[in-house]
Amino acid sequence: MTRPEAEALWSWRRAAAGSGKAAVSTMVLAAMFLLPALSDPPVRAPRIQCVNNLKQVALAARVWEGDNNDRYPMAVYATNGGAYEFIHHAQQSAIPLTPTPSQIGTPPYQGRVFQVMSNELSTPKVLLCPADSFHSMAATNFWTAGQGSGDFDLTKVSFFIGDDAMSERMFIKESDSKEIHDALEDRLGKDLTNLKFKGFKFAQTDDLTKPLKLDLHVSDSNYAHTAGALLLVRPRVLGSHVRTMTDVMQGKPRTYAIELGHAAHFRDSFDIAIPAGYVVDETPDPVDVNFDFASYKSSVSVKGNLLHYEREYVIKDVEISAGQASDFRKLQSAIMNDERSTAVLKKP
């Protein structure tokens, strides 16, 4: 892919299903600022410049945070010099790449985050990645078109800004251990019905140039279910990409565009140890659906005594038209069926 995307990495390792028990660890969440996908073959010099620019953006955010009560622009209201409304209102409205003069001060507009950090960034040139073929021209200033000689808009920005990891970092920073434990337990309990949450550990919470890491230690005494002599195991251990949009899924007429949140690249990988005395009898069919706005693929395989599941979900567009509702339903149905699928184990 040659367009920018935020990448959220979920890496779950070592899930053991012996006697119906699962132990899961290592979850990696996306950092606030992430590099665009680069054209192949990779060019070393432009990639290095991309990394350097990204570091400058991250440093600018840290400086801004230090001057604003330890909060990033996405967590500060516009009346106090931040960009909270411009980011969080994006879930209700379409995000303009090139706002008109009348839209300059009206949410949503994610470019406002960079504009409020203009002093810390010094120049909009650092917002452009030389290896980004989707965006090829840097802005000359931070003023929006319609404001004098302004020419700044999101078509001149290679790096995506979102609040996924930001909200996680802020929650960690402002919550005590029990509050974090309870929140994680609630999330995990949606996938593990007999959850026993043993502990957690965060890492790299202060370094915006690196992913936010979370190690989890959990068990589920009834993860695998028996069906006579068979054992049923769900390969997708944790995490869901299903979007709850009842009206769209029911096929009701829709006038407005469908918001996908933000461009993203998710990867999940799980290994489940096959319990002694069992072999894999049946695995779910692979899934591979591809649309202009998103793609989703998954597969289940047997590697030695491990049941291996992996999937990749790519969101390419921020929004899609109401006329693409049918394709959206097909995508969501494929994801939903995949997440619910089970592998069948039997005794030889």
Image (tube, rainbow, N blue to C red):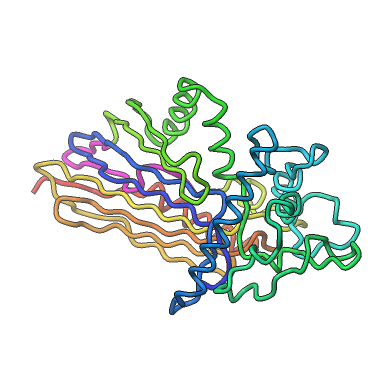
Measured along the vertical axis of the image, is residue 159 above or below residue 18? Answer: below
Q: Main secondary structure of the magenta part?
A: loop
Horizontal and vertical percent position of residue 25: 32, 39
Horizontal and vertical percent position of residue 141: 78, 64
Question: Along the line of sight, which residue is nearer the eye, 274 or 41?
Answer: 41
* Residue 300 found in image quarter: bottom left
Horizontal and vertical percent position of residue 299: 33, 60
Q: Residue furthest bottom?
A: 41
Q: Residue at x 42, y 33 (%)?
A: 188
Q: What range is drawn magenta here?
A: 224-242
Q: Residue at x 64, y 63 (%)?
A: 126
Question: Along the line of sight, which residue is nearer the eye, 218 or 207?
Answer: 207
Residue 229 painted magenta: yes
In the rendered structure, the answer to whether residue 115 lies left or right of residue 227 reads right
Q: Residue at x 35, y 27 (%)?
A: 199
Measured along the vertical axis of the image, is residue 198 above or below residue 346? Answer: above
In the rendered structure, the answer to whether residue 51 lies left or right of residue 109 reads left
Question: Along the line of sight, which residue is nearer the eye, 130 or 284?
Answer: 130
In this figure, what is the number of numbered marks?
Answer: 0
Q: Residue at x 58, y 62 (%)?
A: 53
Question: Along the line of sight, which residue is nearer the eye, 186 or 129?
Answer: 129
Horizontal and vertical percent position of residue 69: 67, 32
* Residue 231 found in image quarter: top left
* Residue 94 found in image quarter: bottom right
Residue 116 painted magenta: no
